[in-house]
Image (spheres, helix red, strand yellow):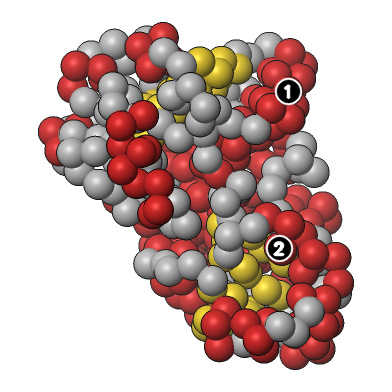
Amino acid sequence: MAVWDMKNALGRGSSTVVPLGSNYLSVRLQNALWSCHRVMAGKDLLHFSDLSGDDLRNLVHLAELLKEAQKSRFTHTLLAGKTLGMIFDKSSTRTRISFEVGMLQLGGHALFLPGNMLQTGRGEPISDTAQVMSRYLDGVMIRTFRQKDVEEFAKYADIPVINGLTDEFHPCQLLADALTILEHKGRLEGITVAFIGDGNNLAHSWLQLAPKLGMNIRVATPPGYQPMQWVVEEAKLHAVQQGTEVLVTTDPERAIEGADVVYTDTWVSMGDEGEAEERLKHFEGYQVNEKLCALAKPDYVFMHCLPAHRGEEVSPDVIDGPHSIIFDQAENRLHAQKAVLAATMADASAFGEDM
């Protein structure tokens, strides 16, 4: 940062925080990018198993600074000349827009690639497609059904592969959620999150993320809809190391009692439409409503990754009420994903003096 800026700021005698100018933002952004880049450059983000708590905190901090840069119109073209391929086998609003806009703001370009328009839709092996795309692109984001397809693509690709959502994990959403909680609560350590509903990709990613960030995670699902056991066991191991709580239960009241964050998701995910009638019966009693939320802390926040079905998994008075932060959460998809893109795809020139 410029020494003059620091002296000028400190010499004003104000008790408030004084902005230190774009030079200071540039230095902070470079430092944050380097902290992520040295661990994640050229790597994949398929889930959180391979990332430490420090790695995750660094990503959230980078997202904070990228958000500050975007809000203050500070140029941050960290991916100038880079191209991201975006493979979509599932429909999308937030994922597509946030990745596409994120690449534009970072100075790069994004290609929308519907899965049914690629040769994989006609039987070309994933391994062939991955190797071909590695010759054209600087990174790939995939939003699909089976986690093993993303992992196979990453196995054969020579470029970073980002999981934009699978049936098993949703890491980009969780990074945005962590950023949102940090903004509203001022901290992550010691925060208790109650996830109520289906033990799906979001529940799995919460179990992977929360203990590593010093957060308590409680998941309440109907019998037969619990999260995968190996994910739960991994979460409990990290919770022991961090001194935090992991609870998986069928009792939503036990999960939500004293919670700082109340979180739910649709009961019928993409691909589960054929089970809709049966699922709605099994999930009766798991709706997040005012009566249930009365057990949370008085200043709890409500979160939902969207799209939401008002009157099913959440009542309108909660999702549209004063505790809801769903649109802050949705916005932060942009900033969190920009952090992942920069951390995995930026090269040495991104750290130049002229940033």
Residue nearer the viewer, 273 or 339:
273
Query: Does 283 sit above or below residue 158?
Result: above
The residue that appears at 82% across and 52% down in the rendered structure is 39
From the image, tell me which residue sits under label 2.
Answer: 150
On the picture, is 182 further left or further right than 158?
A: left
- Residue 264 in percent (x, y) is at 37, 35
106 over 61 or under it: above or below: below
Give the residue drawn at x 58%, y 60%.
145
Q: Is residue 328 visible?
A: no
The residue closer to the viewer here, 33 or 52, is 52
Q: Which mark is residue 233?
A: 1
| Residue 49 lies in quadrant | top right
x then y, percent, for residue 134: 80, 82
**Position of residue 92 measured from the top left corner of the image (x, y, whole percent):** 42, 67
Using the rendered view, name the quadrant where residue 141 is placed: bottom right
* Mark 1 vs 2, N-terminal side: 2
User: In the rendering, at what x and y percent does residue 188 appear?
Assistant: 53, 28
